[in-house]
Image (cartoon, grey):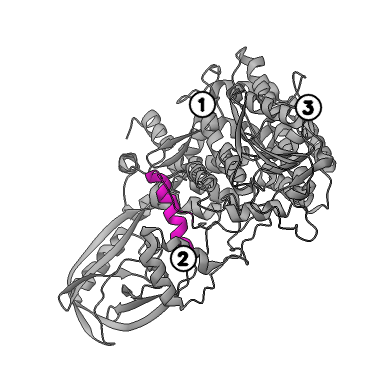
């Protein structure tokens, strides 16, 4: 017998692959996964080849198991119709519709040949809606879904794969339907809205330009665009702080004013002078307390992407790609999950023993087992995923990881260990100081770590130590220095890629698998660019949002996208049919396109000017955009309004003339781009 567990029976309600007679074709999502599956199913397998595509053959008497691989999606949607709206489409081989997928031809041809001689089929692609669709379409077009089964696993370890193939289920049709619906919705919205805006540009300017819009990417672009507009219209306002410095036990301590907002520069200097005259402050209160900080839960994909961005500066797509490679190497469980809960049946003691054999973690695991006395109950979060648990290390020893792969793997292992550790205990002290005769309070704080707890295993959140001497209530402390500092209000920070992803999560659009890809698509389309300070929106990106806000308003709103996301979840639950959702989407698109067509000449003009291929006759005096009012585009018009409005605040706070105000805000780095352009054009730069 070649197979590892041909004598093991199937579980109740399940089918074992060893009960299937004849030839069984197992379809994996990636070549690495195919090899892992073959290794799990047999100690002896034969490596075969069709069209330069490797597959694996296992023979066991009359049984024959073939393990072959896809390379992700092998089919895509297309249409023969020109123009828009278009609602007829069909699935075709992906290499037909995407030139960059030409490498998929050999894989599909190999699977076609293997399907024709197979008696049964097993979809062993990743257990999510994408994997369900990938395997189903291969079987549908080349085999027989009526003789097909589903393998469900969350890691590529030998033990979990063996269990999965002992407990095959029927095809997961709710997942398949939800996945097909997502592809069809994205295609319908994408092709119709994209064709609409491209045709308007072509009709107006006679130039063919590739543009795109989509039901998830466009609300995301609008969110970043709103931040960009706020930054470009921003004018900093001065704020003042009075900063006394005291000395206690040889330690210089800078105090913070906490209860008396100072509105004008004059007020700030008057307060500083009163403190100098008094020469001391009185301790109003001194409090010490400890805080218990619980460990964070194990990673889901979003949490992992956020931490890798914060600690290493990795983009969400980079982290996701690295995590998927670690999964294919059987080092971690399936990463595209929203869960913060570990599998209830996981043998934690055995897994920690395996991890302890990796030299980097031997001492940490030893400490953890001593600390917990072998009682291993992980901290878990609220988020769940019906398909997969939180991300956890499998205990397989890493071999030849790159520095970036090791960095992500290390985060996952350490976060897993931390989930079993005790709370960290943080010591904090706070002293408050009063100016005699005044209702003004200053504050100083300190902190230290009494017990490292989980920080020992996951040190990336360990707080810094700040020493604050002890004070007595009523104690007088001498002020050795006092200064007035002027700062300026800040615009919203440029968002990062991980910030975009977290926003998408918070408003429930996109999925763990698609969010990072959608973000990268916005950069490919040149709607967004990276800067040293974060993500910026190009003029084309602003123009797309501006146009769609006017003519496709529902498309830029989160509500519409979220509505369809809910419907797709309802399909997974079996309470809504895919056909109902597609019909609703078509009706919505029909209504929007009719409205859009009434104004398409205007749309073509706006986008052509943003693309720099058309100069409107009544253009802005400063830029190439069309005039909105008084010779200015809408952005520069608002900037001019902002300049005059904010001057009143500056005049009260600083007592400056309009001329001096313009000179000063023009020099400030945080003053918005459109504001500076208006100053330079209309006020001679002063």
Q: How many residues crowd mark 2 within 10 Å: few (<14), some (14–19), many (20+)?
A: some
Seen at 66% across and 46% down, the residue is 558
Asked whether the beta carbons under mark 2 and mark 3 sit within 8 Å of each other, the answer is no
Question: Front-most of 264 and 218?
Answer: 218
- Secondary structure beneath label 1: loop
Residue under circle 3?
Answer: 89
Q: How far apart are marks 2 and 1 (CA)?
A: 73 Å
Seen at 70% across and 36% down, the residue is 186
Q: Magenta stretch: residue 416 in it?
A: yes
Q: How many residues crowd mark 1 within 10 Å: few (<14), some (14–19), many (20+)?
A: some
* Residue 357 appears in the rendering: yes
72 up-or-down from 500: above or below: above
95 up-or-down from 548: above or below: above
Front: mark 2 or 1: 2
Q: Distance between the residues labelled 2 and 3?
A: 53 Å
First along the sequence among labels 2 and 3: 3
- In the image, the segment drawn in magenta is 396-417
Front: mark 2 or 3: 2
Front: mark 3 or 1: 3
489 up-or-down from 183: above or below: below
Q: In this view, does 161 lie to the left or right of 667?
A: right
* Residue 222 image point, x, y percent: 58, 40
Residue under circle 1?
Answer: 631
């Amino acid at each position: 017998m070649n197979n590892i567990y041909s004598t093991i029976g199937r579980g109740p309600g399940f089918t074992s692959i060893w009960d299937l007679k004849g030839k069984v074709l197992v379809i994996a999502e990636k070549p690495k996964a195919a090899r892992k599956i073959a290794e799990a199913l047999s100690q002896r397998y034969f490596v075969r080849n069709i069209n330069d595509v490797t597959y694996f053959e296992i023979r066991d008497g009359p049984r024959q198991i073939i393990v072959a691989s896809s390379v992700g999606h092998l089919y895509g949607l297309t249409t023969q119709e020109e123009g828009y709206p278009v609602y007829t489409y069909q699935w075709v081989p992906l290499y037909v519709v995407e030139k960059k997928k030409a490498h998929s031809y050999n894989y599909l041809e190999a699977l076609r040949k293997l399907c024709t001689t197979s008696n049964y089929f097993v979809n062993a692609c990743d257990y999510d809606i994408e994997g369900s669709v990938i395997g189903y379409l291969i079987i549908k077009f080349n085999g027989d879904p009526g003789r097909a089964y589903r393998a469900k696993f969350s890691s590529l370890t030998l033990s979990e794969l063996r269990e999965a193939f002992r407990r095959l289920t029927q095809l997961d049709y709710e997942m398949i339907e939800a996945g097909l619906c997502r592809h069809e919705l994205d295609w319908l919205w994408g092709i119709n809205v994209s064709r609409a805006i491209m045709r308007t540009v072509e009709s107006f300017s006679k130039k063919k330009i590739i543009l795109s819009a989509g039901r998830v990417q466009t609300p995301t672009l609008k969110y970043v665009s709103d931040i960009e507009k706020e930054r470009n219209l921003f004018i900093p306002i001065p704020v003042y702080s009075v900063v006394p410095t005291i000395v206690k036990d040889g330690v210089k301590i800078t105090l913070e004013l906490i209860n008396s907002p100072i509105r004008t520069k004059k007020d700030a200097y008057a307060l500083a002078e009163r403190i100098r005259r008094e020469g001391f402050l009185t301790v109003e209160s001194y409090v010490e307390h400890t805080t218990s900080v619980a460990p964070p839960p194990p990673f889901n994909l979003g949490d992992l992407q956020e931490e890798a961005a914060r600690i290493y500066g990795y983009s969400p797509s980079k982290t996701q790609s690295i995590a998927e490679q670690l999964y294919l190497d059987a080092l971690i469980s399936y990463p595209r999950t929203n869960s913060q809960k570990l599998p209830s049946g996981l043998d934690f003691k055995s897994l920690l023993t395996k991890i302890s054999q990796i030299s980097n973690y031997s001492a940490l695991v030893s400490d953890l087992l001593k600390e917990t006395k072998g009682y291993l109950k992980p901290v878990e979060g609220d988020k769940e995923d019906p398909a997969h648990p939180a991300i956890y290390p499998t205990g397989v020893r890493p071999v030849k990881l790159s520095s970036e792969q090791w960095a992500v793997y290390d985060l996952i292992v350490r976060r897993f260990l931390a989930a079993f550790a005790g709370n960290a205990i943080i010591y904090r002290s706070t002293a408050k100081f009063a100016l005699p005769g005044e209702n003004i309070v200053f504050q100083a704080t300190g902190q230290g770590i009494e017990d490292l707890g989980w920080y020992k295993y996951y040190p990336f959140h360990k707080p810094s130590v700040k020493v604050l001497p002890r004070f007595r209530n009523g104690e007088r402390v001498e002020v050795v220095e006092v200064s007035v500092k002027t700062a300026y209000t800040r615009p919203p920070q440029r968002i990062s890629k991980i910030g975009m992803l977290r926003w998408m999560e918070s408003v429930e659009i996109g999925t763990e698998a698609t969010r990072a890809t959608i973000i990268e698509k916005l950069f490919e389309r040149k709607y967004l660019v990276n800067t040293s300070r974060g993500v910026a929106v190009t003029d084309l990106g602003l123009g797309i949002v501006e146009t769609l806000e006017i003519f496709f308003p529902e498309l830029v709103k989160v509500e519409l996208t979220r509505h369809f996301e809910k419907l797709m979840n309802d399909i997974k639950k079996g309470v809504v049919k895919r056909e109902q959702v597609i019909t609703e989407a078509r009706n919505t698109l029909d209504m929007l396109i009719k409205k859009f067509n009434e104004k398409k000449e205007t749309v073509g003009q706006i986008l052509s000017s943003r693309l720099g291929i058309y100069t409107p006759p009544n253009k802005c005096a400063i830029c190439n955009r069309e005039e909105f009012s008084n010779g200015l585009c809408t952005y520069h018009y608002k900037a001019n309004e902002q300049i005059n409005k904010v001057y009143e605040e500056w005049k009260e706070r600083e007592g400056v003339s309009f001329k001096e105000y313009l000179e000063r805000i023009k020099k400030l780095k945080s003053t918005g781009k459109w504001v500076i352009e208006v100053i330079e054009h209309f006020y001679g730069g002063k």
